[in-house]
Image: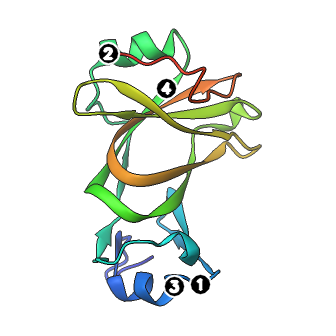
Amino acid sequence: MKKENGQIATVVPVEILETAKGKDITIVLNMGEYSWSINGKNINASDLSDINLEVKMDTSAIPSATVKALADGKPTRQLSLTHNGNFGFKATLTVNVGSVYEGEYGNLYYHDSNGRLIFMHAGKIQKDGSVSIDFSHASDYVIVISEEEHTLTTSPITD
């Protein structure tokens, strides 16, 4: 999405979401270094509004000791979403973590208000280094890159 001045637009107008809601259509929002995909059937909120889907990569909002304890020496990428709270829909973020990790998994953890890292979703890293991960709300997250796909029952949780 481009603004008139050439910058990437990150705010999705409510009209787009309302138009897609309930329909089996997928909106793909190319935001330069990452993209979002939203299927209209996954838009459930009755109180939709404009939403800022900006992603800031390689942030340091999660304490490094917490990330290190979770990652156990594995590579990580922190990211923060500008929006605050629930989206009102499920969206898939596709971001590049590096082609060197092809075939491995990007395991997404949410940093909750109690300082814990909670497993959310995993995606397989593609040949080009991209990984697609599902989100339903905005916060601070860390992607742990691993040969293993984490699940709710296998993921370590850090307090």
Q: Residue at x 28, y 77 (%)?
A: 47
The amino acid beneath tag 2 is: Asp
Of residues 22 and 80, the one drawn nearer to the viewer in this rendering: 22
The amino acid beneath tag 3 is: Ala
State which quarter of the image contains the C terminus: top left
Identify the mark nearer the N-term, 1 or 4: 1
**In whole angstroms, how far apart are the C-alphas of marks 1 and 4?**
36 Å
User: CB under 8 Å between callouts 2 and 1?
Assistant: no
**Disc 1 residue crowd, few under 14, some 14–19, many 20+, Cα 10 Å:** few
User: CB under 8 Å between callouts 1 and 3?
Assistant: yes
Number of the label disc, if any, that sits on residue 23: 1
Side of 23 where 86 appears, left or right? left
**In whole angstroms, how far apart are the C-alphas of marks 4 and 3?**
34 Å
Of residues 128 and 81, the one drawn nearer to the viewer in this rendering: 81
**Disc 2 residue crowd, few under 14, some 14–19, many 20+, Cα 10 Å:** few
- Please provide percent x and percent y for residue 33: 50, 56
SS class of the residue under badge 4? strand
Give the residue at mark 3. 20
- Please provide percent x and percent y for residue 67: 38, 19
Give the residue at mark 4. 76
The amino acid beneath tag 1 is: Lys
Q: Compared to 5, does 95 lie above or below?
A: above
**In whole angstroms, how far apart are the C-alphas of marks 2 and 4?**
18 Å
